[in-house]
Amino acid sequence: MSSTTKLAKKVVVTRQVYAKGLDLLRSKVDEVYVYDEDKGMPEDELKEAVKGAHGIVCMLSDKIHKGIIEAAGDTLQCISTYSAGFDHIDLEECKKRNIVVGNTPGVLTNATADLTVSLVLDTARLIPQAIHAAKSGEWGTWKPMWLCGTELAGKTCGIIGMGRIGYAVARRLHAFDVEEILYFGRSQRPEAEEKIGARKVDLDEMFRTADIIVATCALTPETTNIFNAEAFKKMKNSAIIVNSARGGCVDQDALVEALTTGEIQGAGLDVTTPEPLPTDHPLFQLDNCIITPHIGSASVECRTVMSVLAVENVIAGMTGEKMPTQVHF
């Protein structure tokens, strides 16, 4: 394909994304449909829009199940998700139909690691409570023991899932002079061990000894509800957990109980089940639980790069080339 010839293809983009990606797509593809409302695309509209499509650029919030794939028909060649995760796509159905799938891993590492460490700091240093106190008029004369959180220096930190994001989080925490970094995962990470002294342990040791435990893992049968009632019972009463992985990693009912009874000190969550979490959920009523609305990758830099990579994936998928970041299944 020359630089001026467009592909005689149709691509459906399920949400407005940064212009750099959309401009690239429109310069390469003849027909581009973009859902122009800043909310999830209703399923009936998505089924209608994908009819005859050759490619779909979807979001993590879109459930690309068998019904959506069938609605697209035999023209569908590829699906590119604007996310690192791809458990919202029916890979079995894609495999049956020889549909290639791409995601956007790697590019969100720094943004997600920054947000994860922010949650650690906000939870440890009681930042939301302090902001509320300043705004509400509670801030009065100085008190020696008012709003005293805990420092990171000298603490033992555990990372569940020492992949790209986990290692980025560990490097950032290391800079705060933590005592030790423990990690749990399927494989050894020699680089983390050599550069920051990380030590691979089993979950039991991590839960018993870590002051701060961060989940940055993929959601698998092994990691589903990895933070459960039994885990909380093993933890220190001063322990803080942070989850920037998937909501399914936490048994939220057990977390409410652990935070309410003082079994653990605090929690910071960027992901929940469901999303969005209903505003009347008990976790929102707890001062020692911080919840952000899944903003791990929400930096302008990151989301712009994601838009370009998602588009590059879908273009490659429609031209029979290997996607830059193809999912292998």
Image (tube, rainbow, N blue to C red):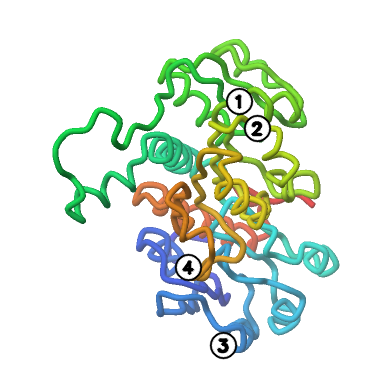
Do labels 3 and 4 touch, CB within 8 Å? no
The residue closer to the viewer here, 96 or 159, is 159
Q: Is residue 97 above or below residue 221?
A: below
Residue type pointed to by label 3: Glu
* Dot 4: element: loop
Single out the mark in the foreground, 3 or 2: 2
Residue type, label 4: Thr
The residue carrying pointer 4 sits among few (fewer than 14), some (14 to 19) or many (20 or more) residues within 10 Å by Cα, namely few
Q: If you read the primary sequence from the N terminus, does the residue marked by circle 3 or circle 4 appear first?
A: 4
**Residue at (19, 54) in percent of width and height:** 135
Determine whether, in the image, residue 222 is placed left or right of residue 62. Answer: right
Residue kind at label 1, given as amino acid type = Ala
Q: Residue at x 33, y 47 (%)?
A: 129
Judging by the rendered image, the residue that carries numbered circle 4 is: 5
Looking at the rendering, which quadrant does residue 143 occupy?
top left
Q: Is residue 238 left or right of residue 163?
A: left
Question: Nearer the viewer's eye, disc 2 or disc 1?
Answer: 2
To which residue does mark 3 refer? 45
> Dot 2: what SS?
loop
Nearer the observer, disc 3 or disc 4?
3
Q: Residues within 10 Å of mark 2 (few under 14, many from 20)?
A: many
Q: Earlier in the sequence, mark 2 or mark 4?
A: 4
Circle 1: element type:
loop
Residue position marked by numbered label 2 in the rendering: 235
